[in-house]
Image (cartoon, rainbow, N blue to C red):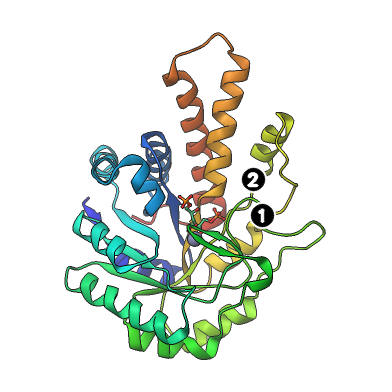
Amino acid sequence: MPIVTSTEMFKRAYKEGYAVGAFNVNNMEIIQGITEAAAECKSPIILQASAGARKYTGPVYMMKLIEAAEAETGLPICVHLDHGEDFEICKSCIDSGFTSVMFDGSKHSFEENIRLTAEVVKYAHDRGVVVEGELGKLAGIEDDVNVSAEDASYTRPDEVEEFVARTGVDSLAIAIGTSHGAFKYKPGQKPQLRFDILEEVSRRLPNFPIVLHGASSVTPEYVAEINANGGNIPDAIGIPEDMLRQAAKSSVCKINIDTDLRLAMTAGVRTHVLNNPANFDPRKYLTAGRDNIRALVTHKIRNVLGSVDKI
Ligand code: G3H
Ligand code: 13P
Ligand code: ZN
């Protein structure tokens, strides 16, 4: 199977009521853990890299590592830029072989967001690459964009048809109450997703794939391990998995997960290092991190996204 766009993945996900996991990748072990889980589950998968991730690996390594995963597993893999903040980064990813880019114009005015997104869409579509746009602001940290919880604003359903028509985007990320990172809600605040907004957006955009960012559940077992070792992450502050399951059955075709991967990888490495203080072979502790990534992604595919046996 080649490196593919998300077009066919989303068509089927929309029709059959599941979502494709978009997992953030930063190194070889993370890519291996994710793709081994997806291959085992026969699940389509999106590997997404932020500008920071691509800078960390270097653009050539990023693409080659993903190509290696595709060759090893035979999976159809969509390679996506997460939170592209300008035309240049989107162009650079498209030119290096990415099949999908997100232009995140959510910090701009509605008009400016449309103008900038449409420029990326033109460049991308001329080269067979698909584009995700964003309307509304998530609370939390989006690459270099800092948005405090107070500033977070839900997507306005009355804007979505015009945005999609004038930009030509292939999918749309919306803000309905998710947020990035491990600290999603204030103490005492209950996770709440605005399914009413999602429904209204879906009604206005029939057969159109919607994207949820900030969808980590802050997996309790990994949080517990980190807190037992001096971490300070409050319990149960992620997006409850039953809410994600509900979203995956709707027009939401792509669900973004990064923080849960970070927690899993770090917990695996730390446990190994603490239990084996004399070990200094990186392969051993990185194997523990990769094993946790594989277990986490298998769980998400089977119990949250519903994308098992969809290739
Ligand atoms: O939403 C952002 C992702 O979690 C990527 O984060 O820019 O630290 O790689 P990053
Ligand atoms: P989390 O921080 O909830 O994992 O969100 C990741 C994300 O939206 C990447 O774009
Ligand atoms: Zn995001």
The 10 Å Cα crowd at callout 2, few under 14, some 14 to 19, many 20 or more, is many
Tell which residue pokes out farthest to the top in this image.
278
Residue at 71% x, 54% y is 237
Q: Quadrant of residue 228?
A: top right
Amino acid at circle 1:
Gly
Say which label, 2 or 1, has the lower sequence index: 2
Q: Are marks 2 and 1 in contact (CB under 8 Å)?
A: yes
- Position of 213 with respect to 140 (left or right) is left
Circle number at residue 299: none
Residue at point 21%, 54% (across, down): 96
Image vertical order of residue 229 relative to residue 208, above or below = above
For label 2, the residue is: 219
Dividing the picture into quadrants, the one containing residue 233 is top right
Outermost residue, right direction?
188
Residue 287 percent coordinates (x, y): 46, 25
Q: Is residue 289 visible?
A: yes
- The percent coordinates of residue 26 (x first, y second) are 40, 42
Helix, strand or loop status at disc 2: loop
Residue 56 versus residue 108 in the image, above or below: above
What residue is pinned by disc 1?
A: 238
Q: Is mark 2 within 8 Å of ligand 2?
A: no
Disc 1 C-beta below 8 A from ligand 2: yes
